Image (cartoon, coloured by chain):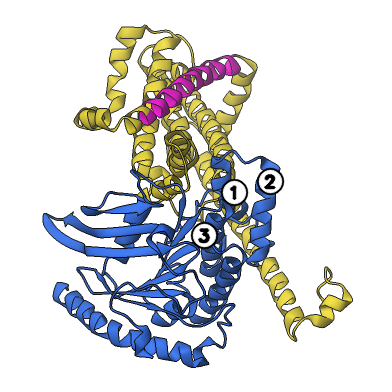
Chain colours: A yellow, B blue
Amino acid sequence: MASTDLNAAEAAALPPGAANVEDDIRAWETQERREKWRLMFVRIILAMVLLSIWEYGTDRWFDALWFSSPLRVLRHLWTWMQDDLLKHLVITLRETFIGYGCGTLLGIATGVLLARFAFLGKVLDPFILALNGIPRIALAPLFIIWFGIGEPSKIVLAGMLSFFLCFYATLSGLRSVDPAYISIARVMGATERQTFFKVVLPAASPWIITAMKVSVPFALVGAIVGEFMAATAGLGFKIQLYTAQFDTTGAVTGVLVLMVVVIMFNTALNRLESHVLRWRPESSGPTGSDIQ
Amino acid sequence: MSASVTAAQAPDAATSVQPASPRDAVISIHRVGHVFRTKGRRVQALLETDLRINEREFLTIVGPSGCGKSTLMNLIVGLFPASSGEILYRGKRRSGVNRSIGYVTQADNLFPWRTLRKNIEFPLELRGVPTRERRERASHLIHRVGLAGFEDSYPHELSGGMRQRANIIRTLAYEPEVILMDEPFGPLDAQTRLILQNQLLELWQEDRKTIIFITHDLGEAVALADRVVVMSARPGRIKTIAPVPIPRPRNLFEIHKDERFLATYQALWLSLEDEVKKGAAQWQAQT
């Protein structure tokens, strides 16, 4: 008997062939697992091949001055870690997250406000459209003028990028709630307040949560770009400095650190998102690209 | 049997419910008409409708699609005001949504972010019913319609029949005085329909709320109802009202052989047939 979790009575009651179904499922799962491992294996091989070509080709086919090499990057990472990498990383992350926190909160609040007061929302629609037309990163130099070369200008930049993403997503999310849900809630006796908090807000939550997720890398970009422009510390400042000194190894290492940070946050946020939005059928609702 | 079909709104002494006197009416609809404006065109959805719905009555409304049945429901529940005429609830005019009336819509409209149990508890939550009582009432109904074991499933994980059952018991949970049902079994297959119709009648038998049930299926209308209302093709108006002289409790699995069922069905079909043809002609003219 293949089905271990069924007792004898239940097993006897199973229609003929049911045990085979269990076996089929198990075989299919094994197949899936094997497939996954194979995929992982091929990916690791590919990464090793690419890195080896890079390492081997350095100073043979191309100049280390322009492209550095994996081993040089690793060596630099090691010495930098013992020096001041952590300090710069903390500064950049602090700018990112203070900006992100304020930006998302304000963005969601503004979105809610304009959705609740429909007239105000309609009045402001063309202005919002105009504002949306600005390539936001182009405001960075202005922010340096207004808020100085210290951390505040980077916080504002990170905050602004998160603000706009969350604001637009919240507004569109709240406006796209199926009116049938609102009608049915009213019929069942919901007050204005209850309708908003128990129906409209949860219905719009996929938009808001997706925007909050997409905002994290954007906030980081804001902080980094701010540091590129004018700063005295932070990873962006360091990358800029290394580049100015023609130290490609340093610059590539900085980029590598940023990459790892973003991957870590994305993984965590994806997990969080799929938990919070577990009620959603797979592949439905807004995705990151709808919101950006 | 055509004598049981009367063109006017007649007291239905033949059925098991109380004869209708104006005092007993839960809802009276007086000369109600409604006009929609769509794409700059005026569409007369409903024309001078008069209807009286009695306490504890199971009333079904049949008519060709697009005849204004759903409009009539939306007007009764008060989602928007009628263009003309008036609707009285227990002798009084109401403005806005009438909280004493429950509404089971054609689309199930379960909230996708809530589990089955949380969906059923929703109207109770709105009324501030304590958690434990909420849970008990929801559980009772969930068991009653055979959804036990799916309490923590989200709507997208349930089949169409299960969602429609949840939709119905969500409204039953808070016990509104009157329940409107707009083709609740419309999208279901024939067997699931029969099972759900039977469950609905059993649930209704327990406390005999007033139910107004819309359908385009004449068989369903006759099998469930105390009285059947036939509506005309657009602009909708009431064409025929007929009592169904079949005693309760009814066995829906056998009712199709009952000669009273057949007689009522055939008499009403004569009335409905023309309207279905007219409705189809309108529909073809549009497309």
- Tell which of A292 and A249 is nearer to you: A292
Residue type, label 3: Asn
Q: Which residue is mark 3?
A: B167
| Eye-nearest disc, 3 or 2 | 2
Quarter of the figure with residue A25: bottom right
Tally the numbered discs. 3
Quarter of the figure with residue A159: top left
> Which residues are drawn in magenta?
A84-112
B282 up-or-down from A124: above or below: below
Q: CA distance from mark 3 to mark 2?
A: 20 Å
Q: CA distance from mark 3 to mark 1?
A: 11 Å
Image position of B59 (left or right of B28)? right
- Classify the position of the C terminus of chain A by image quarter: top left
A107 up-or-down from B248: above or below: above
The secondary structure type at the circle numbered 3 is helix
- Would you call the spot at circle 1 few (<14 residues within 10 Å), some (14-19), or many (20 or more)? many
Q: Which residue is mark 1?
A: B121
- Classify the position of the N terminus of chain A by image quarter: bottom right
Residue type, label 2: Glu
Q: Reading the chain from its start, which is encountered first: label 2 or label 1?
A: 1
